Image: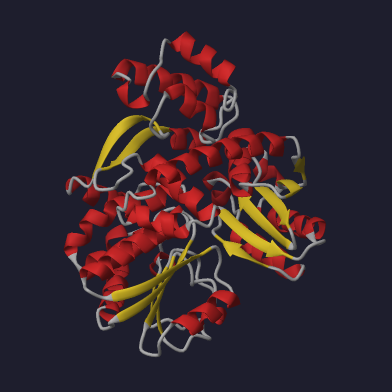
Amino acid sequence: MNLNIEMQKLKELAREAADIIEKYEHVRVISHNDADGLTSAGIICQALLRQDIRFHTSIVPRLDKSVVEMVKETTADDDLVIFCDMGSGQSDIISEIKQDIVVLDHHVPVGESPAKVLVNPHIVGIDGAMHISGSGVTFFVAMEMEPANIDLSGLAIAGAVGDKQIFSTLNGHILEEAVNAEVVSIKKGLKIGDGDIAKVLEYTPEPYLDITGDSEKIAQFLDFLGIEGNIKDLNPDQTKALTSAVALKLAKNASPEAVDAAIGDVYILNNEIVSNVYDLVAILNTCGKAEKYGMGLSICLKDKTHLEEARDMAISHQISIVENIKKGMDMVKEGTSIGYLIGEDMESTGMIASTFVRYVNPEMPFVAVNQVDELVKVSARGTRALVGKGLDLSFALREAAKSVGGEGGGHNVASGASIPPGTAEQFIAKVDEIVAEQLPKQEQTE
């Protein structure tokens, strides 16, 4: 990878997008409802606001025909439509929109985009699953609109953390610029939110330890280490003892990337109203899940009105996630090449899938199927090591979903799908078959 050349190409696309955006008086923004989508919306909304460009923003859980119909009904003929953190894989759907379109996304492009400009790292040879998030792409465009938008880089860092990306190449570049501009600070430690250490370890689903959710075991663990109080107040020796003890716990089963995700650089966002990046990501993901989209976006826009309510919601949601992970682990089955579960009315299937593949069995990807009313949603997760051996969950879920009359896609390492009721077993069998072709058995067990 020649990063300088590829980054320059991405900046050129971002410049094209900025040139188009600046010609419009009113913009219709559509963005995804997870932490990356909400931070993407936060970045573009503030960039537009600073240019006196009016905008109307909607946050959506998925981009389907109903979203296109909504856009048609709420957009004037001379508006620009911007899709953030979505739009690359739905070219056929968004082609029904007659207004000019700009897509700022990091998912694998599918089909010929109807967008005036598609700003996407895959076009320039960079893997958007790991090296830049939707918010990172949006930040590149914001910087082309106005260099002073460097102060929004903290949101781009949060979006990348939310998508569990690595901080080298493009993310590394954004981080370096953010640190140089004193927008972000870095400290070493456990990659978790702030608060009382015992409580945070109890409700934090990541890292998922053998003591997570068990207050008695956590008390024994901390007593042994001689640690108590607020995480922010731990001295360097206490922080080192804590991280070493967690590393030992993770060494038993977890994947190497799970250890990296749990211990190391903690990003402090100096310009945001939630400074610990892991707290911000948890809050935004909770707002997205709870359909409190306005609350999530307002926090990205530095409005403190609903911040305490959002914090309380996030903690309750994390407690619920830990409970669901524990339940989910009892339902796990294994196919030839995948771990999977089929459940009903479960929360946080994506987190269950991530937890299994990171902390329980990193040797095979995991697929969680969840039936809610008449909708069957699927979350699948792998590891970077499995992707290196040939895993492509985006392809596997897209093809398997198509085979049962559903839709799927996403990243090679993390993907999702919607399938018709009654097709879960057939769908799982097809995913298992495809993954078995991608990961021959001898490679899985190396």
Residue 271, compared with residue 258, is above or below; it is: below
Judge whether residue 133 can be spotted in this image: no
Residue 350, compared with residue 248, is above or below; it is: below
- Find residue 443 and report its horizontal and vertical position in percent: 65, 44
Residue 223, compared with residue 351, is above or below; it is: above
Residue at image point 40% right, 65% down: 121
- Find residue 230 and report its horizontal and vertical position in percent: 37, 23
The number of discs equals: 0
Residue at image point 49% right, 72% down: 87
- Find residue 302 and report its horizontal and vertical position in percent: 30, 53
Residue at image point 82% right, 61% down: 422
Residue at image point 34% right, 36% down: 266
Where, by quadrant of the figure, is residue 301 drawn?
A: bottom left
Q: Quadrant of the N terminus?
A: bottom left
Relative placement, left or right, of 356 versus 42 is right
Relative placement, left or right, of 109 versus 78 is right
Q: Quadrant of the C terminus?
A: top right
Relative placement, left or right, of 340 versus 78 is right
Looking at the image, which is closer to me, 66 or 127?
A: 66
- Find residue 344 and report its horizontal and vertical position in percent: 75, 50
Display coloring: secondary structure
Residue 264, compared with residue 389, is above or below; it is: above
Judge whether residue 442 can be spotted in this image: yes
Looking at the image, which is closer to me, 276 or 364?
A: 276
Where, by quadrant of the figure, is residue 331 drawn?
A: top right
